[in-house]
Every structure is written in C-alpha cells, then in structure tokens.
Amino acid sequence: MTPSPGRPTEAMPQFEMHATGVEGATEGTERMEVSMGPHHPSTHGVFRMDVELEGETITKLKPVFGYLHRNHEKIAESTSYLGSMPYTDRLDYFNSMTNNWAYALSVEKLAGIEVPERAEYIRVITAELTRLQNHVSLIGFLVQDMGALGTPLMYAFRERERILDLFESLSGARMMCNYMRFGGCRCDVSADWIKQAQSVVEAFPQFLDEFEALISENEVLMARSQHVGILKPELAIDAGVAGPVLRATGVNYDLRKVDGYGIYDRFQFRVPLGDHGDVYDRYMIRVLEMRESVKILQQALAEIPNGDYVNPKAKLRGFRPPPGEAYGRIEAPKGELGFYLISDGSPKPYRYRVRPPSLINLTILEDMCLGQTIADAVIILGSIDIVLGEVDR
Amino acid sequence: MENEKAILPEVQQIADAINAAVKNAGVTVSINPSPAEQHSLLLFPTKARECAQWLKAESPWQLDYLSNVSGNDWPEDAITKQTPKQPVKDAGEEPMHPCLEAVYHLYSIRQSLGPIIIRMRTENRSDKVELPSLTPIWRSAELQEREIFDLYGIHFEGHPDLRRLLMWDEFEDHPMRRDYVEPDDYDYEPTPHGDVLKKSLTQQEGTV
C-alpha cells in the first residue's frame, strides 16, 4: 500500500528542528509574519496587528486601522449640532456619558453657554459612574487576556450592570445614553435615583476589596504583567499618551486637576501615579482611580443642590453658534477626549473633529511590544484599553 | 480653564517672541471671534518646524504635549461667502486663500498651560499641498498626520511613515474634503479584492 502524499509515515523523515534555506532564518528560529486580527478575540474588536516574530519574540509590529471606519466626522458635519449628540455615544460605546460631556463642553465653549450648578453635579456623577464601570470591565477583560477565563469578568460585569441600571432609569438606555444637552442635561435626576446611586456607590468599595483580594496579588497576574510593556515617561509625553496609561508612567497629568473643567476643583480626591509604567501599574492605577472616583461620587451625591438641570436660555431648536472655533477636552476614562469645532454661523458645524484617546495611545504600541513575546502583546494591548468605535470612527 | 484665560492675551506676545527668536519666522496671530477666545498662531510652512522646535525646547512656555492635530478644508466658496459665514478672520489685511490647513493644539505639562494653537496653510488645494511634518518634534502627530493625509490629502514632508490610515490603500480620493462626491456605486471603487478575485477566477479556470 502506498501512503498518500502529505501523510507522515514511519518511513518519512522527522521534522527538522532547524529551518534551513528559509530566507532570513537564523540558527534555531524562523522569522515569521503573523497577522493578528481583525477577528481575534484578544484585539477587543476589529483591529489588526501585523507582527514579525523571531521565535516568540516580537521584532516588528504595525497596527492596521480602519475596519470600523464610517467617517463619523463627515456625518457630523452634515447634520445639526444636536443631531450628532446621539452619535457621540457610538464613539467609545462603553462610556457614552463622558463622550456626551466632551461634546457638550466644546459646544458650550463655542457658543458661550453657561451650565447651571445642578447640571454640573449631575454631569460629574454620571461621568464618575462611567469611569467606575469602564475601569472595572477593563480589568475583567485584562485578566481574561491573561488566562483567567470568565469568573473575574463576570464579577466585574455584575457590578457594571448595577451602574448600567442606574443609567437606564436615568436616560432610558443602558449604554447609548444620549443624556447631555448643551447647557445641561436632558432630564432631571429624582431623589429616589440619588438614593439608589448612593447605595450602589456605598457598596462599591467592598466589591473592590473582594476583587482585589482575588487578583491583585495573584501570582500569575504578577508574573505576567510586572516588567512587561514598559513605557518611559518622556516617550509617553512626546507621543501624546493620555489618561491612566500616561499616569502609570508617573506623569502627574489629570485634566480634572489641570483644567478643573466643570466643578472638579470642588472635590477632594487624589491622582494615583505609577512607578514603573508596566502593565501591572496600568492595572493598579485603574483600581486606585476607582477608589478616588468613589470619593468624588460620595461628595457629589451628598452635596447636589436644587435648581435647574438645564440652562433655560439654551436653545434646543434653531441653535446657531456664532462664527469661530473652540477646542474642549475632558478626562474620559480612556484618556483625553477632545472635540475641535468650527462654526460658520450656520446650524451645522463647519468642522467637527474628535481627538480620540484610544487611537493616539496606540502610537506607542510598537515601542512597548518590541522584544516582548507575542503573548505579552495581547496583554499590553489590553492594558492600553482601546475601543475600536473610537479608534476608527 | 483659568489657565486658558490667563494665557490668551499673551498670544500676541508669543508671536512676537517667536519672531524675535527665529529669523524670518513671520508668525501672525489669527483671531478667533467666538466666545472661546482661542486665538491661534499662523506659521509659514517653510519656517514651521524651526518655530515648533523652539516652542517645544527653548521657549519659556515649554510646550511638550501635542494634544490634537486637525485638518481643515477651505475651498473658494467657503471663503468668499460674507461674514458671518466666514469662520476665522485673519488679522492681516490679506484675505485667506483657498487652502488646506493643519491645526495643532499644544499644551505644556510642566507648566500646565494651554491650549496654544498653531496652524499652517498650504498654497492651494490641488497641486501644492505640502506642509512640513511636525512628527519629528512631537510623535503624537504620527497617526494624526497620517489620518489628515488620508482624509484631506495634505502631504506631510518628513513624516516617517506616510500611508493611509483609515481608508484602504487603493482608495484615491480624500473623503473629508468639502467638495468630495460620493460614488454612485461603491463597487467601482478600487479595492484590494480586485486582484484576489482575478487570481481566483484564473485558478478556477485552471490557467494559472
């Protein structure tokens, strides 16, 4: 009986350990090009990395963008100012409240609209709740990337669901909230809602303790993430990295403190800073930031005054900002989210530009991954915290 | 925001300081009439990199953080329309010419001030669309300039890796320009699949 071609038999030679005759091959290893993505569970969406490997070590990594591109900016330029408010929800679909706020803040700068005090408090409360649910689910995804399948992510999602319930009872939608308006918010919060939010916030630190007891000093997590994907502060500043990734390198730059937008200068909270700039620091920064967010929430929920939830003078229909331009930015959970707007006096923006933190944080992905193994690239990408709806826009 | 207000009357001072430090810089201030009062510095493209290097490394403002890079398109009809249609009025006597524009929003982390805005304009919108890339100075511009090259068609000279970012490589137009016309049928757009399709057809017929 003749063996079919391609099937190994006893007569066939063993596979050689050393690839010879392959172009660019060195002793013992073979250079390989791997295309990770766009449909890879660890890329958090439709994102592709063209990776060149020497054995398991990364020698080159080029991110490829655009699979989710729908030219958000062009669409926003062809509709009214308020018309693109619901569309900003879809940028970073985890954090619709902060997207709304960044856009509303820029338009308020452009048109010179005042925001009532109660609305500022509601904005801070919703933004910090958003930060809690973003960071907690990010940690769930990160430890899932490290191999802790399921359980921590489900714990995280259980907490996230409580916050999404609050958003649902406030705005009618769990994720696509479309809640902010120019000069305030769409609807008022009730006393019941504030009580409910208080109970969620009060229970949160206990959950964090429990969560941290499970994973913070876990040996596998420490082995996988410490001294992995180190980012130097000079490079981080130069490359415009923002948010927790920047602060994990030790740079004290939190827009809530620096710009003091909204009413953040009224609250007592600290800005956690990292030391090494590795993946573990980026994990730890988020845990500490959640604890600080809880502090802000406790103060804001206790102090919220009565009054207007939207500026009564702000026009909803026929809104035409005076000609000019404005750039506004806030500290979104993923970094600095900015909107650059030019008005020509018509009801549509002449120019509408989003400064996406996820995209700009990816500038240094290759620098962090070089010399690391391919398995580390997965958690480095996870620790940057990207959402492709915002990267590709 | 308080920082912003403190720095804004100083925009003219910054322009004067650049003009004193960099030879023939010719920096002018572009007035922003909106309540945001974010005025900007208009740089000559040929001198822009020198000015930017000075702003980052030697100036007293230490602008080490480039936050945002945006492209703008100013076709003929957007400029000729009378105010209030005209968005940004130039301080100089010369009216704005049809051009593509790149706007950079700079901050200083060390001194926590900003934004200081610089802008550069191309000579026209068709064949002279080159601007110097500021990526060698602030790496933050790397992906953002690629995006502007992709969507607006500004060629950034000196960019280390100027490729399309969001659209596919074979795409020929620049969709964020104001006169961009959508194709009637996207099937006629060249895509990478064309070659693959041809190859698969020939393989099916057995004529490789």
Image (cartoon, coloured by chain):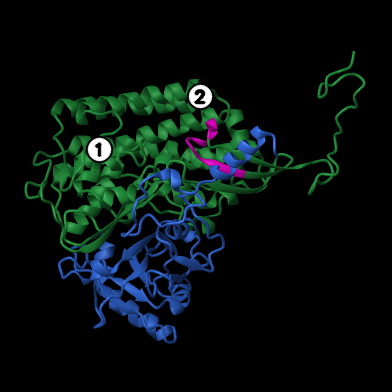
Asked whether residue A330 is in view, the answer is: no
Q: Secondary structure at mark 2?
A: helix
For the residue pair A22 and A58, the one nearer the viewer reads as A22
Q: Are marks 2 and 1 on the same chain?
A: yes
Is residue B98 located in the magenta-colored stretch of the structure? no
Looking at numbered disc 2 in the image, what kind of residue is underneath it? Leu
The kind of residue tagged 1 is Ile
Q: Where is residue A291 shown, x and y percent of the image?
A: 37, 36
- Span of residues in magenta: A39-50
In this structure image, what is the colour of chain A?
green
Q: Does dot 1 land on a helix, a strand or a loop? A: helix
Instruction: Tell whether A281 sits left or right of A50.
Output: left
Image-based side of A120 in relation to B18, left or right? left
In the picture as drawn, the residue positioned furthest to the right comes out as A11
Other-residue count near label 2 (Cα within 10 Å), few / some / many at <14 / 14–19 / ≥20: few
Disc 2 to disc 1, C-alpha distance: 28 Å
**Residue at 21% across / 41% down in the picture?**
A180
Q: Quadrant of the N terminus of chain A?
A: top right
The disc numbered 1 marks a residue on which chain? A
Q: Which mark is residue A125?
A: 1
Front-most of residues A39 and A110: A39
Q: Which mark is residue A214?
A: 2
Chain with colour blue in the figure: B
